[in-house]
Image (cartoon, rainbow, N blue to C red):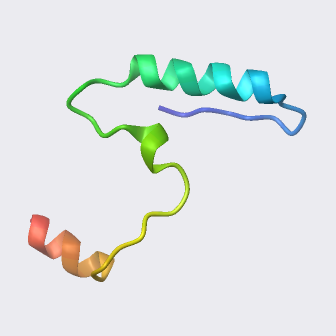
Amino acid sequence: MVTVLKQGATKERIKIILEQIKKASNSKEIDAPKYLGKIKLKKDALTIQKELR
């Protein structure tokens, strides 16, 4: 899903968009608003990818 935020977006508009994302997300998928921003990892990202494969 792609969400476009324009430069003059208000806080209310951003909240509405986040609610739409939350409603549209499937329970099998990750909770996107929970991970907005940076994720702190204890391992290297490449190592994690290799483990998942």
Determine which quarter of the picture holds residue 7: top right
**Quadrant that contains the C terminus:** bottom left
Q: Which quadrant of the view contains residue 41?
A: bottom left
* 53 vs 24, nearest the viewer: 24
Which residue is located at x 14 percent, y 75 percent?
Answer: 50
Q: Residue at x 68, y 33 (%)?
A: 4
Determine the residue positioned at 27% across, 81% down: 43
> Picture quarter containing residue 51?
bottom left
Asked whether 20 or 11 is in front, the reply is 11
Q: Is residue 46 above or below residue 32?
A: below
| Residue occupying image coordinates x 20% and y 31% | 28
Q: Position of residue 12 (x, y in %)?
A: 77, 22
From the viewer's perspective, is 6 left or right of 20? right
Q: Is residue 28 above or below residue 30?
A: above
Q: How many marks?
A: 0
Task: Name the foreground residue: 46 vs 21.
Answer: 21
Measured as percent of width and height from the top left, residue 45 is found at 31, 76
39, above or below 21, in the image: below
Residue 29 picture location, percent across and down:
26, 35
Q: Nearer the viewer, residue 2 or 43?
A: 43
